[in-house]
């Protein structure tokens, strides 16, 4: 019975060790590619949790991902990566505020009505981002410094530095693959 926890822990520790050593073993392009794959894998696993485990078919799932991405884009200085210590909580907070508003209205519905209201919220988020000047400026990569303050904490650890890809994405990805206690 005591061997069972180690049998479950060792693959996760091995995956984390490989991911931590990744920047030293491969070139920067492949580190960035692995980071993007891990981020999208976490996104896909969250959709599997929502649809596969709870049975809630949600068409607005990508809006939360996009709102977090736009928050990072708008709060980062032009031409360089923003500070991880500032942009990560801001992205989570922006997506969380949107999730609070969407959840307060959509979780009261069931069945096809839930599907339709999440689709409506996804379309509203799309058109807000598509038609507002501040979001268009972020998409076009023009300067947003006149509209938004550029907060800069310690710039030593940014989204593009190699440790951030494995230290941040690696454990989250490994824990997302961790089997549930019921499995």
Image (cartoon, helix red, strand yellow):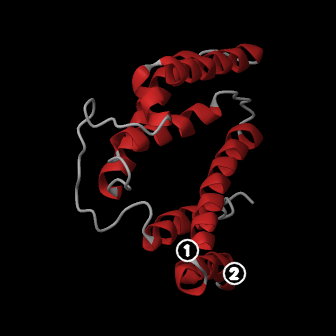
Residue at 62%, 75% in the rendered image: 12
Label 1 sits on a secondary structure element that is helix
Residue 169 horizontal side relative to residue 119, left or right: left
Image location of residue 26, percent across then percent down: 61, 82
* Res 107 visible: no
Point out which mark residue 7 bears: 2
**Front residue of 99 and 3:** 99
Residue positioned 51% across, 18% down in the render = 131
Between 178 and 140, the residue placed more toward the observer is: 140
Residue 34, by quadrant, is bottom right
User: Sequence order check: which comes first, mark 1 or mark 2?
Assistant: 2
Residue 49 shown left or right of residue 39 in the figure: right
Residue at the spot x=43%, y=30% of the render?
137
- C-alpha span from label 1 to label 2: 33 Å
Asked if labels 2 and 1 touch by Cβ distance under 8 angstroms, the answer is no
Q: Quadrant of residue 19?
A: bottom right
Camera-nearest label, 1 or 2: 1
Query: Is residue 149 rendered to the left or right of residue 89?
Result: left
Q: Nearer the viewer, residue 156 or 147?
A: 147
Residue at figure coordinates x 53%, y 79% from the top left = 23
**Can you give x and y, in whole percent of width and height, for residue 58 in the image?**
69, 29
| Left or right: 100 as drawn, with respect to 170 | left
The front one of 101 and 65 is: 65
Q: Which mark is residue 62?
A: none
Quadrant in which the N terminus appears:
bottom right
Residue to which mark 1 is pinned = 28
The 10 Å Cα crowd at callout 2, few under 14, some 14 to 19, many 20 or more, is few
């Amino acid at each position: 019975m005591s061997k069972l926890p180690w049998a479950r822990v060792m693959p996760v520790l091995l995956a984390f060790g490989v991911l931590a050593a990744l920047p030293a073993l491969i070139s920067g392009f492949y580190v960035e590619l692995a980071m993007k794959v891990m981020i999208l894998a976490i996104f896909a696993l969250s959709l599997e949790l929502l649809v596969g485990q709870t049975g809630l078919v949600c068409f607005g799932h990508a809006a939360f991902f996009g709102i977090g991405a736009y928050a990072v884009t708008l709060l980062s200085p032009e031409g360089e990566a923003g500070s991880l210590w500032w942009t990560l909580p801001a992205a989570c907070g922006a997506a969380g505020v949107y999730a609070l508003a969407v959840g307060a209205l959509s979780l009261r519905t069931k069945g096809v009505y839930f599907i339709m209201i999440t689709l409506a919220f996804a379309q509203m988020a799309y058109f807000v981002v598509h038609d507002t000047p501040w979001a268009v400026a972020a998409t076009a990569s023009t300067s947003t410094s006149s509209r938004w303050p550029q907060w800069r904490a310690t710039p030593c650890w940014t989204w593009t530095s190699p440790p951030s890809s494995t230290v941040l994405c690696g454990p989250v990805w490994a824990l997302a693959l961790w089997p549930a206690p019921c499995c």
